[in-house]
Image (spheres, rainbow, N blue to C red):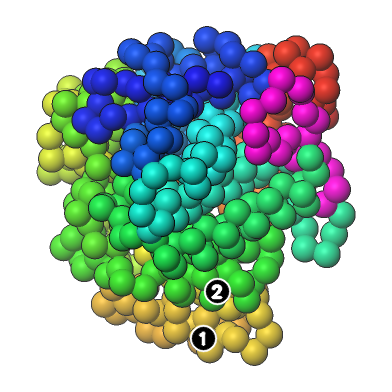
Amino acid sequence: MKIFRNSKLRIFSTAVTVVTLSLTSCSKDALQLDPVSRVAPSTVFATTQNAYAAINGMHKYLYSQWHDNQAAGGQSGNMLYMEVLGEDFVMTAQANGWFINEYKWLNHRNAESNINLFNYAFYYAMIGNANAIIANIDGAVGPDEDKNFLKAQALTYRAWSYYQMVQLYGKRYVKGGDNGSLGVPIIKEASLEAKPRNTVEEVYAQVNQDLDEAIILFGSAKSRPDKSHLNVNVAKGVKARVALTQQNYEVAATNAREAKQGFTLMNPEQYIDGFVSFSNPEWMWGINHRDDQPTYFYSFYAYIGNFSSTNTRGNPKAINSLLYAKISDTDIRKQLWDPTGADNTFPLAASGVRMPYMTRKFTMPNPNNSNGDLAFMRAAEMFLIEAEALANLTGREVDARKALFDLVITRDPDYTLSTKSGAPLIEEILTHRRVELWGEGFRFYDLKRLNMPLNREGANHIASLAGVLTVPAGDKRWEFLIPQGELNRTLDVVKQNPI
């Protein structure tokens, strides 16, 4: 194992090399970039001050290019993939072709595709870096509050990465059901031995173990310097997501409620321009992107928003017209899309075309480059998790309505407390979730965890462009294929999903 230091970064950003795909040996194919210099683990973890470089390197991974793949810009790549696989994110034209085969539900079912390689290698690289910090930080010289802060972040990153992966490569979790199908290999230390895939149940158990330990450690850790670092709120936010996916609704509601403490929801004025600024009061975790760290065409904003790329100019992203019709006219969120495609005051990429239902949600104040702050967790999501979880608990519908109201009233001044119960109440909450989190990387995950089918019919999807309009719930296509490189390197110790 080698530790790399990239001297070009603002803070000494390092990355622990964790390759091949299953972390069993070194291969340039799985490296983010060739290292500028190499630093021994004994140096990186000699002091807590030095060790901050390792955690900063993980933060940088979240918006770095992978495998020379233009669409794989760190976590933003996953966010875009998860949206184009859903029904609420509409591609309006072919443009330069990026994300079209994902939109057609082709590439995640191709073991040689970039979407499978990226999502597999990216999260395992995060896991490998986290493992190095967890294994070495206790021996570093420095204050315990620094050690706890660094270790808690590493544990949270590891849990989050496994959670992201198991939802892609494994079957959906069913509470009380058989979760003994294959998930992903649990790797907690560097090894030359190939490891087979653990079960979905085992992966979720590891995720929860890491999160529980992280939450305890954050209690005696120093405060984070900014929202690019993780803290107890983020750990509880991830815990809430995981519990919701596992249908552990009491745990989900409790952690979501605690996670959002200390954060203020956007007011209507902030909402219109609130999705590209690190200073946003409801952002819990995100990227604070410096202009001197360019992301070029692997940025999130090279595919959505007003940065002028071939993709944004020719394929402005749109909302599902049926979902748009469900938004109240008094809801500020409705102003994020132009249903006519003819509003000349609506922000547009330079020399771009206008399309019905196009979005302005991710409009940058400086569209001349693709750099932009990006949120990975917002307080609004926690309100929605709390509401959905409570609505699924017997006798908690009053509380669910209140949690939903507390969010939606900040978006729609005419919204009144819901009087719905049962399935209609849950449907109302899920509709607000779709509107609120549109474009932020949740839709494929939500459809899968809810065991819902893909249904793009009757909306503004272009059938010839979308390729696939419907996919039944539970279909094998809801599972990503394991990259062929992983099968080859492990000599089939890692088994493929049904093809």
Whole-percent x and y of residue 172?
Answer: 73, 49
Amino acid type, callout 1:
Asp
For marks 2 and 1, give the CA distance: 10 Å
- Residue under the image location 85 percent in, 48 percent down: 180
Q: Callout 2: 10 Å neighbours few (<14), some, many (20+)?
A: many
User: Is residue 187 within the magenta segment?
Assistant: yes
Q: Is residue 57 left or right of residue 363?
A: right
Please indicate, yes or no, whether residue 228 appears anywhere in the rendered image.
yes
Q: Is residue 241 left or right of residue 305?
A: right
Q: Quadrant for residue 439, please give it.
A: top left
Q: Which residues are magenta?
A: 179-197
Whole-percent x and y of residue 60?
Answer: 35, 33
User: Helix, strand or loop at disc 1?
Assistant: helix
- Tell me which label, 2 or 1, sits earlier in the chain: 2
Whole-percent x and y of residue 336?
Answer: 28, 51
Q: Is residue 197 left or right of residue 317?
A: right
Find disc 1 in the rendering and name its residue.
Answer: 399
Q: Which mark is residue 253?
A: 2
- Residue under the image location 53 percent in, 89 percent down: 398
